[in-house]
Image: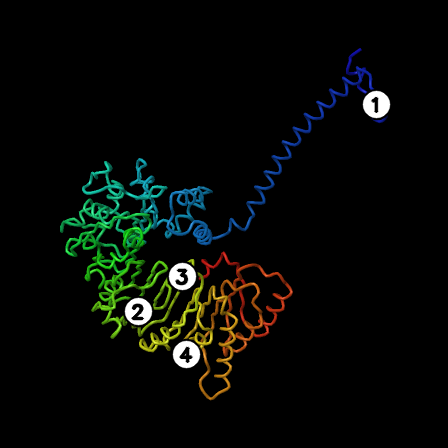
């Protein structure tokens, strides 16, 4: 008798607790294997059907009907800015999703107009051709090139000639970088983080910037925006020529926008910082006089910044970063005395940013009748916050001398610690103010808002014109968690116009019901309110 036929029926075993015989156990094991095989086959068929189901649903997905222009904008926000090597690879991966995504990526020309490269990137074979292919996808948009050595060793230790005493060739004489600056493409913006002036001199010599041929157009001379960053080195030998006629800065293109980050004073003058007063930064007047935008970061002692600014009458945007220090100079310097007496006039300047300053002393030397935006960031250092008694006096005198109280539209005050009543009076005097940003002013914020509310209410009740009649955007950033909401409400209620209010806190609020009550009160005032996390500030302001 066939074994399978003899043992085909084991139902009495499956439906009872009887112990199977050896033959019945073998039959059951065979059945288990058969069922497991069928399950695997069925599961494979099920997975295939589920895959087909997903593909059918995907065919009806709204994303397929999304216009390529919208997909291009999505890609632009995912991979934004001037992309370094990983960012460029990310953008290429997005363009390989499918044909429509590739077409969308190619539509977003702004993504391809900039290249950020490090020394290791231009060592690769075919680096120049890859960069040119990247630029080719940007169409006719202005091109941006950013270059620095990168890695842990960002300092070039070459000395003297091309082959330095240290035995190394200047690391900025990279053939790919030289070709990009000498042959093509036509660049609009160039960012260069460089070790010292002699390295820049060698690079300019390599691209024939020092002795250009009139018959061969040099893309370098067509630059409109240039950033030179010397500030990333712990120790720098400032080896520019002592005489202005031989300075490397004479061979810079006549750009309209220049950013100059000088090395910190302790990186150059370690033994005696006062020696910085006798040093020279030879930016030629022909270059400075052509600028409409100028950003300088320099904490050197002396009148270096004032000496640059006196040759910049066409400026429209100016940023001064003092690395957390003050202007330290000789009061007997004729330039300083003249700047104090008559002030340096900038008739077209509409945006002024003073970053990482200890005081407002820079304003003592400036006159800006067309100013529309003022940004001031205080650096207190390790000594802690100290009340700046002269802040309001300096600010008010600057506004009076510049006669820009009615033209100023935006005021941003970061990390200010001064007398709140005086600051409130200075702010209320700005008749044309439309936007006010107060960040990291926790020590005086409650008193400041209270003083502002009182002065605005007082002006509204008198026959005079209302205070701050055009103020419509206010940002209170990094507000302390313990601050009472009532002072903010009183300030908002005092204003004559509807307000767009942005708030961020140092820490999350611990009382949600208080937050809800606060929001309801603001809605009753018809104020548009945004509460944003602290980490999003760089995106908003």
The quadrant the C terminus occupies is bottom left
Q: Is residue 129 above or below residue 390?
A: above
The quadrant the N terminus occupies is top right
Mark 1 or mark 2, whichever is nearer to me: 2
Q: Is residue 140 above or below residue 56?
A: below
| Residue 359: quadrant of the picture | bottom left
Mark 4 or mark 2, whichever is nearer to me: 4
Q: Which residue is mark 2?
A: 349
Q: CA distance from mark 1 to mark 2?
A: 96 Å
Q: CA distance from mark 4 to mark 2?
A: 21 Å
Q: Earlier in the sequence, mark 4 or mark 2?
A: 2
Q: In the image, which disc is placed on residue 429?
A: 4
Q: Which residue is mark 3?
A: 379
Horizontal arrangement in the rendering, residue 173 relative to residue 360 (left or right): left
Label 3: how many residues lie within 10 Å, few (<14), some (14-19) or many (20+)?
A: many
Give coordinates of residue 452: x percent, y percent: 49, 76
| Residue 54: quadrant of the picture | top right
Q: CA distance from mark 3 to mark 1?
A: 85 Å
Q: CA distance from mark 4 to mark 1?
A: 97 Å
Q: In the image, which disc is placed on residue 13?
A: 1
Q: Earlier in the sequence, mark 3 or mark 1?
A: 1
């Amino acid at each position: 008798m066939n074994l399978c036929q003899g043992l085909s029926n084991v139902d009495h075993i499956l439906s009872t607790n009887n112990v199977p015989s050896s033959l019945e156990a073998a039959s059951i094991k065979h059945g288990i294997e058969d069922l497991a095989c069928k399950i695997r086959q069925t599961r494979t068929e099920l997975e295939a059907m589920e895959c087909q189901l997903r593909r059918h649903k995907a065919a009806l997905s709204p994303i397929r009907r999304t216009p390529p222009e919208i997909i291009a904008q999505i890609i632009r926000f995912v991979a934004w800015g001037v992309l370094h090597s990983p960012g460029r690879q990310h953008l290429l991966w997005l363009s390989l999703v499918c044909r429509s995504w590739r077409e969308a990526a190619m539509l977003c020309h702004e993504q391809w107009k900039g290249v950020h490269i490090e020394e290791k990137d231009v060592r690769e074979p075919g680096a120049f051709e890859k960069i040119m292919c990247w630029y080719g996808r940007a169409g006719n948009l202005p091109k941006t090139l950013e270059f620095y050595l990168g890695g842990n060793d960002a300092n070039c230790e070459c000395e003297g000639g091309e082959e330095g005493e240290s035995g190394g060739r200047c690391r900025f004489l990279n053939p790919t970088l030289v070709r990009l600056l000498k042959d093509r493409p036509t660049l609009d913006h160039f960012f260069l983080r460089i070790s010292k002036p002699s390295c820049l001199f060698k690079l300019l010599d390599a691209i024939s910037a020092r002795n250009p041929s009139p018959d061969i157009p040099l893309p370098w001379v067509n630059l409109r925006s240039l950033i030179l960053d010397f500030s990333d080195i712990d120790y720098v030998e400032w080896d520019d020529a002592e005489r202005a006629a031989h300075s490397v800065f004479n061979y810079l293109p006549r750009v309209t926008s220049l950013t100059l980050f000088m090395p910190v004073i302790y990186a150059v003058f370690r033994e005696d910082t006062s020696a910085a007063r006798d040093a020279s930064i030879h930016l030629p007047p022909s270059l400075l006089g052509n600028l409409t935008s100028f950003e300088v970061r320099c904490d050197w002692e002396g009148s270096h910044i004032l000496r640059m600014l006196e040759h910049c009458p066409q400026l429209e945007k100016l940023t001064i970063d003092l690395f957390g220090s003050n202007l330290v100079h000789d009061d007997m310097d004729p330039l300083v005395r003249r700047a104090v007496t008559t002030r340096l006039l900038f008739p077209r300047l509409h945006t002024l940013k003073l970053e990482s300053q200890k005081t407002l002393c820079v304003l003592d030397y400036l006159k800006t009748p067309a100013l529309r935006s003022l940004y001031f960031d205080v650096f207190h250092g390790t000594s802690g916050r100290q009340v700046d008694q002269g802040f309001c006096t300096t600010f008010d005198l600057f506004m009076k001398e510049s006669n820009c109280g009615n033209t100023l539209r935006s005021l941003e005050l970061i990390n200010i610690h001064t007398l709140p009543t005086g600051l409130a009076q200075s702010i209320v005097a700005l008749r044309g103010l439309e936007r006010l940003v107060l960040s990291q002013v926790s020590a005086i914020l409650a008193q400041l808002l209270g003083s502002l509310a009182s002065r605005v209410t007082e002006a509204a009740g008198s026959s005079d014109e209302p205070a701050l009649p055009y103020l419509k955007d206010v940002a209170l950033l990094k507000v302390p968690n313990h601050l009472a909401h009532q002072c903010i409400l009183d300030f908002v209620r005092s204003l004559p116009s509807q307000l767009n209010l942005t708030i961020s806190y140092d820490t999350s609020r611990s009382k949600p019901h208080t937050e809800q009550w606060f929001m309801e009160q603001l809605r009753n005032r018809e104020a548009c309110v945004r509460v944003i996390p602290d980490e999003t500030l760089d995106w908003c302001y």
